Amino acid sequence: MKKFLKISTLILVSAMMLAGCSKNAKKDYILATGGTGGTYYPFGGAIANIWNTKIENMNVTAQATGASAENLRLINKGEAEYAIVQNDVMDYAYNGTDLFAGEKLANIMTIGTLYPEVVQIAVSKDSGIKSVADFKGKRISVGDAGSGVEFNAKQIMEGYGLTFDDIKKSNLSFKESAEGIQNGTLDGCFVTAGVPNAALQELAFTAGLTLVPVGGEAAKKICQKYGYYTQTTIPGGTYKGTDDDTPALAIKATLAVSSKLDEQTVYQMTKALFENLDELATAHAKGKEVSAKAAVTGVSVPFHPGAKKYFKEIGLE
C-alpha cells in the first residue's frame, strides 16, 4: 500500500511539473509572408523579431510563401497562424468573391492594416489621357490575369462608368506594362504596389509618364462600395517629371490572424507590435508608414477579439 502511495505521489508531482512546464512552454507560430525578393518577407521578419523579443516564450517564424491568396488559405487550413496579405484579397477570401469565388474562408480575422499599396495609373505622355474616363478605346494593361491588380482596375474603371469591354485590355506584369508604354504598344497601365515602384521609376527616366488621378466623387463612390480602399496621395516628385501631388486610391498590406487563436495571445501580440513601432521603422523602411491610428482603417474583415481589445484600450475602437 505504501509503495502504491509513493508511486501515486510521484505521478501527481510529475503531472504538476508537466502542467507548469506546458504553461511556460514556448509558443511556436508561423507568420506567412511572400517571396524572398519582395517586401512582405523581410517586413514579416521584422514583425516576428519584435514578437519574439518582447513577449515571453514566443517563437514566431516568418515563412516565405506565394503571398496573399496562398497565405489566407494557409491560415484557414491551420498551417499558419498569422500572415501579411492585401486587404482587398482578404475581403474576397472572407466573402467568397472574385479571386475566391465560391470559396469562403471562415477562419481568418484582422489584427490591423499596416501600410498602403497604392493603385498607380500611369499613361504615356502623348496618350492624351487626363482621367480614367478617357480610357475608352485605349490600350490598357490591367496586371496579370486573375490578379488583385486586375480587380483593382475593374473596380476603379467601374467608378467612372467603364468596363473592360470599353478598352483594349492587356494582362501584363508591371515590367512588361512599363515596356509597352515605352515602346508605344500601350497607352497606360495599372500598378498596385508601394510607392515608388521600380518599373514606373525606370519608365519615368526613359520615356516619361503621366499619373492619372483618382479623386473627388468617383473616389468616394468607389470607397463606399468597396470598404478596403482608402484615399491617398502620390507625392509630387515621386517619379521624374511628376511635379504635382496626384490623388489615388490604395489598398493596404494587412496583418491577418487565425480566428482560432485565443484572445489573450492576440492581444499581447497586437500590443507588442504597435507599442514598438520605432523598432519596426528601424528594421524596415515600411515600418515608418505603420501607425495604430491607421491600422483600424481599410478594414472590411472583422477584427480578432484580441486586437479589438487593444485598439479599444487605446481609444481607437
Image: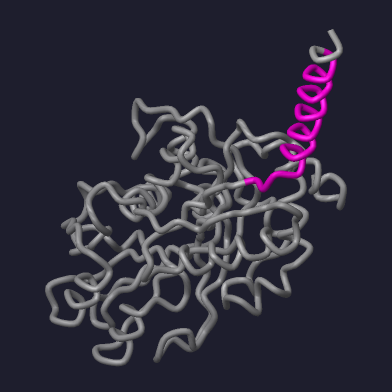
Q: Which residues are magenta?
A: 5-27
Tell whether 36 sits left or right of 22.
left
Which residue shows up at 13% across the image and 81% down it? 183
Q: Is 227 positioned to the left or the right of 261 in the image?
A: left
What residue sits 74% from the left and 60% below the top? 274
Q: Position of residue 10 (x, y in %)?
A: 79, 25
Q: Is residue 152 above or below residue 17?
A: below
Q: Is residue 114 left or right of residue 212?
A: right
Check residue 165 for magenta coloring.
Answer: no
Q: Quadrant of residue 305?
A: top right
Task: Name which quarter of the figure residue 208 lies in.
Answer: bottom left
Position of residue 173 measured from the top left corner of the image (x, y, whole percent): 24, 65
The image shows residue 316 at horizontal and vertical percentages of 81, 50
* Residue closest to the eye, 132 or 10: 10
Q: Position of residue 42 (x, y in %)?
A: 49, 69
The image quarter containing residue 202 is: bottom left
